[in-house]
Amino acid sequence: MIEPVKHVEIALSDVTQFIYHEARLQDEHEYDAWEELWADDGIYWIPSGGGGGDPESEMSLVYDNRSRIGLRIRQLNSGKRHSQSPRSRLCRVISNIEIVGTEKDAIRVVANALVFESNSRGETLWPARYEYLLRRVDGDLRMSLKKVLLVNNDKPLHTLSFLI
Amino acid sequence: MGAIENTSNWTELIRPEHVHGSVYTNQAIFQAELEKIWYRTWVYVGHVSEIPEPNDFVLKSIGPQPVIMTRDDKGEIHLLQNRCTHRGAEVCQKTKGSAKSFTCPYHAWNFANDGELRGFPYPSGYEGVDKKKLALARVPRVDTYKGFIFGSMAADGPTLIDHLGAASEALDRLVMTSPKGEVEITAGFLQHKVQANWKLVVENETDGYHPKFVHASIFSVADSKIGELYGEESTAVTRCLGNGHTENDLRPEFRRRGTPLSWFGTSVDKLPDYVSRMQAAYGSAKANEIMIDGTPHIMIFPNLFIAEIQMFVIQPISVDETVQHVTALQFKGASDLNRRMRQQTMGSVGSAGFLLADDAEMYERTQRGLNARNPEWLFLGRGKHREHQDEQGFLVGNVTDDIASRGIWEHYLSLMKDGETQ
């Protein structure tokens, strides 16, 4: 049942707390705990080629439905994902968190992220704009969309095998 | 080491079962490859479906150099160097679009999309100057096979058909996956950058030894039958097609299964529309054959890799940097198949791909490993004792053998030696 927009009242402090928590789980490779942050209809989307065109017709770096998110997590948990063995050392800064709208029973949130990655290849900065659709499921915030618009996604990119 | 790194001493560096580590790390060798391979032989540039209409253009490359691939208003295809003939500025910044001409933003020289210089401001300052001599540089030879556009920076040399040789048959097979007989490249490219020499990428594409180990993670958690194609017990073979072209021929395994669309991990009941279009186009028996055999897995030297459901274009940037441009293959008249092609390709390849992230990891670890100077040689002798000629006279071996690498290096040696006395 879709609730009217007026009932979607989620405090910015709750949203901020959720996004910081998600960031820490990603930085610390807490894969299973991160997977629990997804709603059943979750879409994890990292567009390519400049904008965020239509992922149904254009190639994206990642365009995972909920089941493919699960597959991604199982691959990381297999211990044989060479590009994450050893794991990247990560530290990300999230800022400019802003609730920009509501959509059905969800709120639309944008934020800026700067992720520093250190691995055996070298050191890489991943600058991105995040866009979330968040909604409450049994009282807890859950992601039904996380879109990661890398600032340089129109250029050749290094391997990106950690969770961004 | 000094003597052996002499870049003209090619037969010393490349031996029948060994190659010297410096071929992947030496700056002078990379420069020599640009001259003797990338700016000489036929290099894949783009596909006709990327510039379908008159005046369409798209930015592409030949090796590290950018080229503008255009279709002029008469429909003819040109490969132009993106460099103003005045002072050298790039004339085109957009990655694709439609334009009858390109105006250099520096001094407003204007070039038609076939390269001709149309005009410049204040022409009285150019009295007696022949505009014909100031056209954008054109890649001297452009040719197309089944919609795949190749360019050669050399004015003379073997024709494209001669260069493709037996590899052309794989492209013939590929387009028949479409009920209309055409491939379309319309889904856009991922650009995956690796800190590794381009030849490590090329050799890996038809190396049937690595999948079980490099891709163990995804094979262990996904319901994938790819892994079993690449075991020593597999009936698939690796084949050298000449001119450096190599393939993993998986058809023996698919024919053993005998199930249409098994090659794509699906079945006829999942793609009824596609199946009926194929039957209408080719007849039931031939359609069945095509759908059992599947698409090729072929590395067309030096830069076009057709990997069943996707296409990679390999671009060398420097001795230790390579970009793989990758997109899902799309088949005209097969929208339900194409959707799955895109979904599977996005999952598999590119920077975050279930498969390619780990291939890239191996390219980069190898590049770093080669900084250690001993042992000097890489050993590519696996399966030498069991390679043999097939009924068509091509060298084949077990799918896990190093036969493809040996075929690539043999051709490489012939190109690098060409014109030198040894």
Image: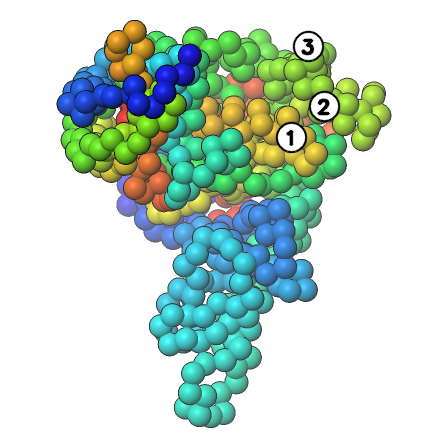
Q: Position of residue B85 (x, y in %)?
A: 44, 73
Question: Which mark is nearer the camera, 1 or 3?
Answer: 1
- The residue lying at 40 percent from left, 16 percent from top is A2
Q: Which residue is mark 2?
A: B273
Counting residues from the start of the chain, the first of labels 2 and 3 encountered is: 3
Q: Nearer the viewer, residue B369 or B152?
A: B152
Q: Which mark is residue B257?
A: 3
Q: Amino acid at mark 3?
A: Arg
First in sequence: mark 1 vs mark 2: 2
Disc 2 chain ID: B
Residue B422 shows in this picture? no
Q: Residue at x 20, y 32 (%)?
A: A97
How far is mark 2 from mark 3, CA to CA?
22 Å
Q: Chain of mark 3?
A: B
Helix, strand or loop under label 3: helix
Label 1 chain ID: B
- Residue B335 disc label: 1
Q: Amino acid at mark 1?
A: Ser
Q: Are circles 1 and 2 on residues that touch, CB within 8 Å?
A: yes
The N terminus of chain B: image quadrant: top left
